[in-house]
Image: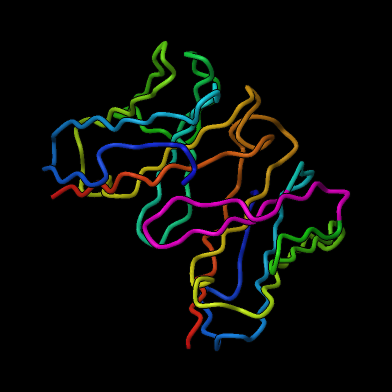
Amino acid sequence: KNQVEQSPQSLIILEGKNCTLQCNYTVSPFSNLRWYKQDTGRGPVSLTIMTFSENTKSNGRYTATLDADTKQSSLHITASQLSDSASYICVVTPNTGFQKLVFGTGTRLLVSP
Amino acid sequence: DSGVTQTPKHLITATGQRVTLRCSPRSGDLSVYWYQQSLDQGLQFLIQYYNGEERAKGNILERFSAQQFPDLHSELNLSSLELGDSALYFCASSVEEQGPGYNEQFFGPGTRLTVL
Protein backbone atom coordinates (compact mmCIF):
# COMPACT_ATOMS: atom_id res chain seq x y z
CA LYS A 1 0.00 0.00 0.00
CA ASN A 2 1.29 3.44 -0.93
CA GLN A 3 2.02 5.44 2.19
CA VAL A 4 3.69 8.65 3.21
CA GLU A 5 4.79 8.99 6.80
CA GLN A 6 6.06 12.19 8.34
CA SER A 7 8.00 12.82 11.47
CA PRO A 8 7.93 14.29 13.94
CA GLN A 9 4.20 14.70 14.32
CA SER A 10 4.78 18.03 16.02
CA LEU A 11 7.74 20.18 16.83
CA ILE A 12 8.45 23.29 18.89
CA ILE A 13 11.56 25.35 18.21
CA LEU A 14 12.83 28.75 19.23
CA GLU A 15 12.75 31.59 16.78
CA GLY A 16 15.97 31.80 14.82
CA LYS A 17 16.78 28.11 15.13
CA ASN A 18 16.95 25.62 12.28
CA CYS A 19 14.88 22.46 12.00
CA THR A 20 14.46 19.46 9.73
CA LEU A 21 11.25 17.64 8.98
CA GLN A 22 11.24 14.10 7.63
CA CYS A 23 9.13 12.30 5.07
CA ASN A 24 9.39 8.57 4.35
CA TYR A 25 7.36 7.08 1.56
CA THR A 26 6.68 3.67 0.11
CA VAL A 27 5.27 4.97 -3.17
CA SER A 28 7.12 3.43 -6.09
CA PRO A 29 7.65 4.33 -8.79
CA PHE A 30 6.87 7.95 -8.25
CA SER A 31 6.69 11.00 -10.41
CA ASN A 32 7.33 13.83 -8.00
CA LEU A 33 7.38 14.82 -4.36
CA ARG A 34 6.08 18.09 -3.02
CA TRP A 35 6.21 19.91 0.27
CA TYR A 36 3.30 22.15 1.20
CA LYS A 37 2.93 24.66 4.00
CA GLN A 38 -0.52 24.93 5.52
CA ASP A 39 -1.38 27.66 7.97
CA THR A 40 -4.13 26.77 10.42
CA GLY A 41 -7.51 26.89 8.74
CA ARG A 42 -6.09 27.88 5.37
CA GLY A 43 -5.31 26.14 2.13
CA PRO A 44 -1.91 24.53 1.52
CA VAL A 45 0.72 26.49 -0.35
CA SER A 46 3.37 24.74 -2.41
CA LEU A 47 6.94 25.19 -1.18
CA THR A 48 8.94 22.85 -3.39
CA ILE A 49 8.46 20.15 -5.96
CA MET A 50 11.09 17.62 -6.94
CA THR A 51 11.09 14.93 -9.57
CA PHE A 52 12.63 11.55 -8.81
CA SER A 53 15.88 12.66 -10.47
CA GLU A 54 16.39 15.75 -8.32
CA ASN A 55 18.23 15.72 -5.02
CA THR A 56 17.58 19.16 -3.65
CA LYS A 57 15.38 22.18 -4.20
CA SER A 58 15.41 25.47 -2.36
CA ASN A 59 12.82 28.15 -1.84
CA GLY A 60 14.24 30.92 0.30
CA ARG A 61 14.85 29.59 3.79
CA TYR A 62 13.27 26.25 2.86
CA THR A 63 15.43 23.50 1.38
CA ALA A 64 14.03 20.11 0.44
CA THR A 65 16.18 17.07 -0.21
CA LEU A 66 15.26 13.78 -1.78
CA ASP A 67 16.91 10.37 -1.67
CA ALA A 68 15.02 8.18 -4.09
CA ASP A 69 17.06 5.13 -3.13
CA THR A 70 16.03 5.22 0.51
CA LYS A 71 12.66 6.81 -0.28
CA GLN A 72 13.24 9.66 2.09
CA SER A 73 12.81 13.40 1.83
CA SER A 74 13.51 16.14 4.27
CA LEU A 75 12.54 19.77 4.56
CA HIS A 76 15.09 22.00 6.26
CA ILE A 77 14.04 25.38 7.57
CA THR A 78 16.80 27.85 8.27
CA ALA A 79 16.66 30.74 10.73
CA SER A 80 13.05 30.04 11.65
CA GLN A 81 10.56 32.87 12.00
CA LEU A 82 7.30 33.06 13.90
CA SER A 83 5.47 32.97 10.57
CA ASP A 84 6.89 29.52 9.91
CA SER A 85 4.45 28.14 12.47
CA ALA A 86 2.24 25.89 10.37
CA SER A 87 1.74 22.33 9.24
CA TYR A 88 4.11 21.00 6.61
CA ILE A 89 2.75 18.32 4.34
CA CYS A 90 4.70 15.91 2.17
CA VAL A 91 2.85 14.71 -0.94
CA VAL A 92 4.04 11.99 -3.31
CA THR A 93 2.69 11.39 -6.79
CA PRO A 94 2.95 7.79 -7.98
CA ASN A 95 3.90 7.37 -11.57
CA THR A 96 0.49 5.98 -12.37
CA GLY A 97 -1.45 8.99 -13.49
CA PHE A 98 -4.55 10.59 -12.13
CA GLN A 99 -5.87 10.97 -8.65
CA LYS A 100 -3.21 8.91 -7.00
CA LEU A 101 -1.64 11.61 -4.88
CA VAL A 102 -0.58 10.24 -1.51
CA PHE A 103 -0.58 12.77 1.31
CA GLY A 104 1.27 12.62 4.58
CA THR A 105 -0.60 13.77 7.68
CA GLY A 106 1.91 16.54 8.19
CA THR A 107 4.26 17.90 10.82
CA ARG A 108 2.88 20.68 12.97
CA LEU A 109 5.62 23.22 13.63
CA LEU A 110 5.42 25.89 16.31
CA VAL A 111 8.09 28.56 16.36
CA SER A 112 8.27 30.12 19.79
CA PRO A 113 9.63 33.62 20.49
CA ASP B 1 -4.01 35.09 -1.95
CA SER B 2 -4.02 32.14 -4.36
CA GLY B 3 -6.72 33.56 -6.62
CA VAL B 4 -9.05 30.65 -5.84
CA THR B 5 -12.21 31.63 -4.02
CA GLN B 6 -14.54 29.44 -2.02
CA THR B 7 -17.90 30.15 -0.46
CA PRO B 8 -19.17 29.96 2.13
CA LYS B 9 -16.28 30.17 4.56
CA HIS B 10 -18.24 28.41 7.29
CA LEU B 11 -21.30 26.22 7.15
CA ILE B 12 -23.20 24.67 10.04
CA THR B 13 -25.98 22.22 9.34
CA ALA B 14 -27.74 19.19 10.75
CA THR B 15 -27.44 15.52 9.98
CA GLY B 16 -29.46 14.40 7.00
CA GLN B 17 -29.29 17.76 5.31
CA ARG B 18 -27.80 18.71 1.94
CA VAL B 19 -25.32 21.53 1.27
CA THR B 20 -23.53 23.02 -1.70
CA LEU B 21 -20.02 24.36 -1.62
CA ARG B 22 -18.84 26.69 -4.33
CA CYS B 23 -15.44 27.28 -5.86
CA SER B 24 -14.15 29.75 -8.43
CA PRO B 25 -10.76 28.82 -9.91
CA ARG B 26 -7.95 31.19 -10.75
CA SER B 27 -8.40 33.10 -13.95
CA GLY B 28 -7.28 30.89 -16.82
CA ASP B 29 -7.25 27.63 -14.86
CA LEU B 30 -9.35 24.90 -16.41
CA SER B 31 -8.92 22.17 -13.81
CA VAL B 32 -10.67 22.16 -10.45
CA TYR B 33 -9.99 19.68 -7.66
CA TRP B 34 -11.89 19.04 -4.46
CA TYR B 35 -10.29 17.81 -1.24
CA GLN B 36 -11.57 16.89 2.19
CA GLN B 37 -9.52 17.41 5.33
CA SER B 38 -10.94 16.02 8.53
CA LEU B 39 -9.64 17.08 11.94
CA ASP B 40 -6.01 16.05 12.32
CA GLN B 41 -6.22 14.06 9.12
CA GLY B 42 -4.41 14.46 5.85
CA LEU B 43 -5.95 15.84 2.70
CA GLN B 44 -8.10 13.37 0.81
CA PHE B 45 -8.59 13.90 -2.90
CA LEU B 46 -12.25 13.71 -3.86
CA ILE B 47 -12.68 14.60 -7.52
CA GLN B 48 -11.26 16.57 -10.44
CA TYR B 49 -12.96 18.41 -13.28
CA TYR B 50 -11.36 19.77 -16.38
CA ASN B 51 -13.18 22.26 -18.57
CA GLY B 52 -16.56 20.99 -17.47
CA GLU B 53 -15.86 17.28 -17.59
CA GLU B 54 -15.07 14.87 -14.80
CA ARG B 55 -11.46 13.75 -15.11
CA ALA B 56 -10.54 11.82 -12.01
CA LYS B 57 -12.19 10.42 -8.94
CA GLY B 58 -10.66 9.78 -5.58
CA ASN B 59 -12.26 8.71 -2.33
CA ILE B 60 -15.56 10.43 -2.95
CA LEU B 61 -18.66 9.03 -1.30
CA GLU B 62 -21.76 8.30 -3.36
CA ARG B 63 -23.61 10.89 -1.25
CA PHE B 64 -21.26 13.51 -2.66
CA SER B 65 -21.30 14.88 -6.18
CA ALA B 66 -19.72 17.74 -8.04
CA GLN B 67 -19.95 19.60 -11.29
CA GLN B 68 -18.10 22.28 -13.18
CA PHE B 69 -20.07 24.89 -15.06
CA PRO B 70 -19.33 26.61 -18.39
CA ASP B 71 -17.87 29.60 -16.57
CA LEU B 72 -15.52 27.08 -14.90
CA HIS B 73 -16.74 27.54 -11.36
CA SER B 74 -17.45 24.31 -9.55
CA GLU B 75 -19.87 23.12 -6.92
CA LEU B 76 -19.54 20.24 -4.50
CA ASN B 77 -22.84 18.84 -3.29
CA LEU B 78 -22.97 16.90 -0.06
CA SER B 79 -26.20 15.12 0.81
CA SER B 80 -27.58 13.00 3.65
CA LEU B 81 -24.93 14.56 5.82
CA GLU B 82 -23.45 12.63 8.70
CA LEU B 83 -21.46 13.79 11.70
CA GLY B 84 -18.34 12.35 10.12
CA ASP B 85 -18.66 14.67 7.15
CA SER B 86 -17.60 17.58 9.34
CA ALA B 87 -14.34 18.74 7.81
CA LEU B 88 -12.56 21.41 5.85
CA TYR B 89 -13.28 21.19 2.17
CA PHE B 90 -10.69 22.67 -0.13
CA CYS B 91 -10.89 23.49 -3.77
CA ALA B 92 -7.75 23.81 -5.86
CA SER B 93 -7.19 24.80 -9.47
CA SER B 94 -4.50 24.37 -12.05
CA VAL B 95 -3.94 25.26 -15.66
CA GLU B 96 -3.52 21.88 -17.24
CA GLU B 97 -5.67 18.86 -17.75
CA GLN B 98 -3.37 16.23 -16.35
CA GLY B 99 -4.13 14.77 -12.97
CA PRO B 100 -3.46 16.40 -9.64
CA GLY B 101 0.13 15.28 -9.48
CA TYR B 102 1.55 16.79 -12.59
CA ASN B 103 1.17 20.48 -12.24
CA GLU B 104 1.02 22.99 -9.45
CA GLN B 105 -2.30 23.37 -7.78
CA PHE B 106 -3.40 26.55 -6.08
CA PHE B 107 -5.65 26.03 -3.10
CA GLY B 108 -8.57 28.13 -1.97
CA PRO B 109 -9.14 29.15 1.65
CA GLY B 110 -11.53 26.27 2.28
CA THR B 111 -15.04 25.84 3.59
CA ARG B 112 -15.39 24.59 7.14
CA LEU B 113 -18.42 22.32 7.36
CA THR B 114 -19.85 21.43 10.75
CA VAL B 115 -22.59 18.82 10.92
CA LEU B 116 -24.48 18.77 14.21
Number of marks? 0
Q: Does residue A33 sit above or below B101 in this rendering?
A: below
Residue B4 horizontal side relative to residue B10, left or right: right
Point out the residue furthest to the top here.
B70
Q: Residue at x 48, y 49 (%)?
A: B43
B38 in the magenta segment:
no
- Residue B7 image point, x, y percent: 28, 37
Q: Residue at x 50, y 26 (%)?
A: B27
Residue B95: quarter of image: top right
Q: In the rendered structure, which segment of residues is drawn in magenta?
A: A33-54
- Residue B6 image point, x, y percent: 34, 37
- Residue B100 image point, x, y percent: 60, 34
A47 in the magenta segment:
yes
- Residue B58 image point, x, y percent: 50, 33
Q: Residue at x 37, y 31 (%)?
A: B23
Residue A101: quarter of image: top right
